[in-house]
Image (cartoon, rainbow, N blue to C red):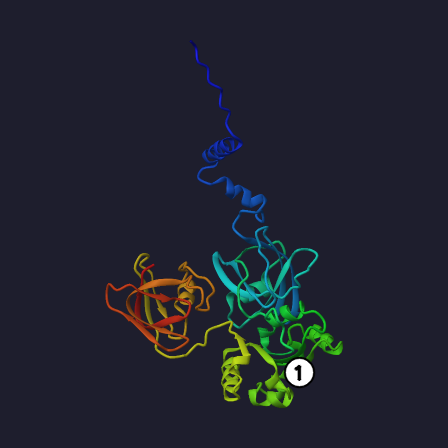
């Protein structure tokens, strides 16, 4: 008796896997995805990227980047930030910027607004040299500087400089009349107010009450003056974003008033304590040695010398930059605390908020 068996035809999945293996053999040393990245970099399943569609000047040193995110972009809540990775002189840098666009943009794009800071390699590149069509890397949106689902009856936003950016993201998505809003914003002059025309228009239309503090003529914002500018300050939930010094002063003042629980702050950069003398920074694997200043993050010092380093938020939050300290001492730029390692130790340090406090050796 002859027994016959049905011929098993390859399933679509098997055929696809065979095709991919064949493609990998043909395209070695690159992978098929490497070629797809050239023709469809924003496709679903790829590393999350964005394409800069427009660069819109805001002030002499600030610009809004309109970005078309990849298909896997999960959206954001107003007030959140997104980390973007941009290549500058052959080195990829990651920076976090607040999303300032409306949620219902008809073109599906998002926008971040960047203020160029003195000696800021990435911010100056983005504001002054980036052109439409530039591809960047993206992370998903993050951050807790957002309004609660149940809006407070009265809100106060205290901002300075680029600290207005997360607040503008909130204001642009806030339904008219949803809450009573006061915005106190500090900038050197009227021309330096990012989104100045739009903020003043919101004020004229009664959507917000805007108080501008122009520091060139009126000096720095004094938290004690806020009670005069905002009479019902104690009745408002407050959000503040701006330079570290301003936020420290606001937190102290709110605590003195017994209002600490009603203040929420967003810090773009760690407070830097200019202490210590720096030292020689060396890397065990590459053999690179360089001199690092006592107020310069190890991450920045290494990148300035051409050493490629792991990095993330650059604010001491995500721990994407941690490396083992094998020997020496580093200082936490936020607190001044010194961490030491005996020869052969592997104490993990965050290179974005640690500076050399003498000779130090990093395992990298």
In the image, residue 12 lies at what x, y percent? 53, 31
In the image, residue 138 lies at what x, y percent? 54, 57
- What residue is rendered at 24% in x and 63% in y? 344
In the image, residue 209 lies at what x, y percent? 69, 80
Tag 1: Cα neighbours inside 10 Å, few (<14), some, or many (≥20)? some
- What residue is rendered at 43% in x and 64% in y? 304
- The image shows a total of numbered marks equal to 1
Q: Nearer the viewer, residue 182 or 149?
A: 149
In the image, residue 167 lies at what x, y percent? 61, 72
Quadrant where the C terminus sits is bottom left
In the image as oriented, which residue stretches furthest toward the top? Answer: 1
Q: Nearer the viewer, residue 14 or 113?
A: 14
Q: Is residue 342 left or right of residue 208?
A: left
Note whether 215 is above or below 334 in the view shown. Answer: below
Quarter of the view holding residue 229:
bottom right
Quadrant where the N terminus sits is top left
Q: Is residue 315 left or right of residue 112?
A: left
Quarter of the view holding residue 273:
bottom left
- Residue receiving disc 1: 211
- Judged from the image, the secondary structure of the residue bearing numbered disc 1 is strand
In the image as oriented, which residue stretches furthest toward the front? Answer: 1
- What residue is rendered at 59% in x and 50% in y? 71
In the image as oriented, which residue stretches furthest toward the left? Answer: 343
Note whether 317 is above or below 39 in the view shown. Answer: below
């Amino acid at each position: 008796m002859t027994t016959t068996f049905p011929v098993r035809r390859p399933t679509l999945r098997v055929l696809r896997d065979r095709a991919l293996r064949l493609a990998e053999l043909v395209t070695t040393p690159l992978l098929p995805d490497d070629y797809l990245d050239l023709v469809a970099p924003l496709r679903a399943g790829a590393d999350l990227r964005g394409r800069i569609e427009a660069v819109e000047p805001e002030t002499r040193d600030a610009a809004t980047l309109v970005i078309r995110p990849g298909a896997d972009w999960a959206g954001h809540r107003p007030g959140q930030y997104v980390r973007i990775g941009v290549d500058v002189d052959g080195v990829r840098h990651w920076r976090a910027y607040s999303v300032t666009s409306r949620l219902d943009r008809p073109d599906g794009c998002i926008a971040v607004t960047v203020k160029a800071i003195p000696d800021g390699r990435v911010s100056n590149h983005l504001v002054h040299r980036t052109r439409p069509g530039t591809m960047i890397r993206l992370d998903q949106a993050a951050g807790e500087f957002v309004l609660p689902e149940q809006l407070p009856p009265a809100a106060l936003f205290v901002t300075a400089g680029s600290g207005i950016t997360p607040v503008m993201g909130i204001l642009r998505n806030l339904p008219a009349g949803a809450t009573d809003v006061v915005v106190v914003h500090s900038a050197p002059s009227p021309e330096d107010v990012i989104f100045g025309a739009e903020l003043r228009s919101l004020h004229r239309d009664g959507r917000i009450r805007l108080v501008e503090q122009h520091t060139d003529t009126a000096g720095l914002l004094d938290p004690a003056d806020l009670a005069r500018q905002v009479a019902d300050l104690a009745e408002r939930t407050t959000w503040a974003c701006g330079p570290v010094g301003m936020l420290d002063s606001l937190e102290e003042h709110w605590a003195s008033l017994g209002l600490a629980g009603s203040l929420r702050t967003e810090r773009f950069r760690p407070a830097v304590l200019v202490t210590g003398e720096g030292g020689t920074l060396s890397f065990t694997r590459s053999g690179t040695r360089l001199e690092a200043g006592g107020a310069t993050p190890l991450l920045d010092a290494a990148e300035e010398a051409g050493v490629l380093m792991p990095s993330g938020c650059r604010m001491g939050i995500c721990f994407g930059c941690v490396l083992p300290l094998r020997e020496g001492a580093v200082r936490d730029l936020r607190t001044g605390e010194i961490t030491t390692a005996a020869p052969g130790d592997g104490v993990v340090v965050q290179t974005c908020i640690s500076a050399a406090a003498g000779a130090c050796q990093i395992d990298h």
